Amino acid sequence: MGSDGESDQASGTSSDEVQSPTGVCLRNRVHRRISMEDLNKRLSLPADIRIPDGYLEKLQLSSPPFDQPLSRRSRRASLSEIGFGKLETYIKLDKLGEGTYATVFKGRSKLTDNLVALKEIRLEHEEGAPCTAIREVSLLKDLKHANIVTLHDIVHTDKSLTLVFEYLDKDLKQYMDDCGNIMSMHNVKIFLFQILRGLSYCHKRKVLHRDLKPQNLLINERGELKLADFGLARAKSVPTKTYSNEVVTLWYRPPDVLLGSSEYSTQIDMWGVGCIFYEMAAGRPLFPGSTVEDELHLIFRLLGTPTEENWPGISSIEEFKSYSFPKYKPQPIINHAPRLDSEGIELLLSFLRYESKKRISADEAMKHSYFRQLGMRVHTLPESVSIFTLKEVQLQRDPGYRNSSYPESGRWRIQMFNQLVNCDF
């Protein structure tokens, strides 16, 4: 796989797609000058890319006709000549976090002059690249969405594999901390919708994130929220395929996984969405358990101990029987999240269903009446377009917001992108 992370199929733009204003196909003829716009379309480059001096002139002589498909080999060679796939293209700035296998740096791209996040994964010659890194690359190269962090480049050397991500200012946990855990309920709605929008895109492609938590949701100054850290994500092609149950941070892990289930679908992510929704609205974690048993106790105390009626088959699960949980009755969740209106409570409970197949899907949740205030146009935007392009979608000032903490205070900046390191792979 080259730095572009693409398949062996021919890529580029056909003659039907790249046309001059008069409808004539773009060909590299003697009297036809290749423009920067032509090159951006040809190689799918960002509009703000900086092409090295002399590259366009050289391309006039060496480039194949623009109406022919560009092979992977040719495209990779072109990208390499521009500067992709090379460490010297990126300047390391601050060290943001470090784990067993990886270190994350704040950096700057010489091609765009934009900030980037450099996830430097150390390679052990005996073991090669960690499987989570391979998984993250293989998934992210195919996920192109406004609410999913962008993987810009991949740099492979003998000693390291560096993933170059877009840089975002902070994660949702840091955002909530900076608000004194008192977010505007309007902003809660906007962030939740963006989480669902990114997840809906993933789930339609049979990709499960499997590690949703506030630290894995990145936010920029505009308020755009993006799903990050796909190290535990899986492409799920068969609904009954078995996976490890050692996934998802404990506080956001659904009870079926806590009790040992390894057969699940996209619903595993939806429980975590509910926990994050509550945390944004209430200013505290919903189920902050210290052990699996403690986590289950907290869940059952609030939602009631499950029965065959609301969780068919629960009485035959050995792990459930071994704990001998008391018979808790469900509590009114409004008592714990008084800032949520009736529609918000209804949506929250639809995420927190014991029976996984009864949990609302991301696509269904986006259509819930709770989001009526955002209007209808948020549902018709192209996948690559931010909801903030709509004038009716704007963040409000959070009641507990501390101005000194955003965007350049030391605490959150030092913690930045620790979720990309994720401690141990």
Image: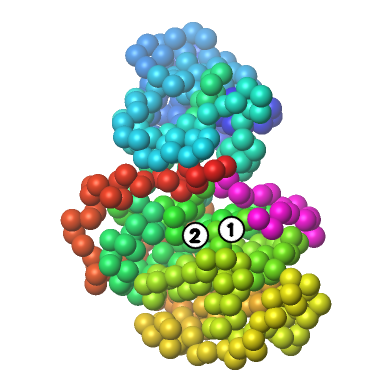
Label located before the other in sequence (1 or 2): 2
Distance in Å between CA atoms under marks 1 and 2 = 8 Å
Is 404 situated above or below 321?
above
Residue 240 falls inside the magenta stretch: yes
Q: Position of residue 77 (x, y in %)?
A: 55, 17
Instruction: Write down the region rendered in magenta.
Output: 230-246
Answer few, some or many: residues within 10 Å of disc 1's Cα (few below 14, many 20 plus, some between 14 and 19).
Answer: many
Q: In the rendered view, does 218 fall on the left or right side of 16?
A: left
Q: Is residue 27 visible?
A: no
Q: Position of residue 221 (x, y in %)?
A: 30, 52
- Looking at the rendered structure, the kind of residue marked 1 is Val
Callout 2: SS? loop
Q: Which residue is mark 2?
A: 213
The residue located at (36%, 40%) in the rendering is: 96
Judge by depth and name the residue closer to the eye, 88 or 394.
88
Q: Position of residue 183 (x, y in %)?
A: 32, 70
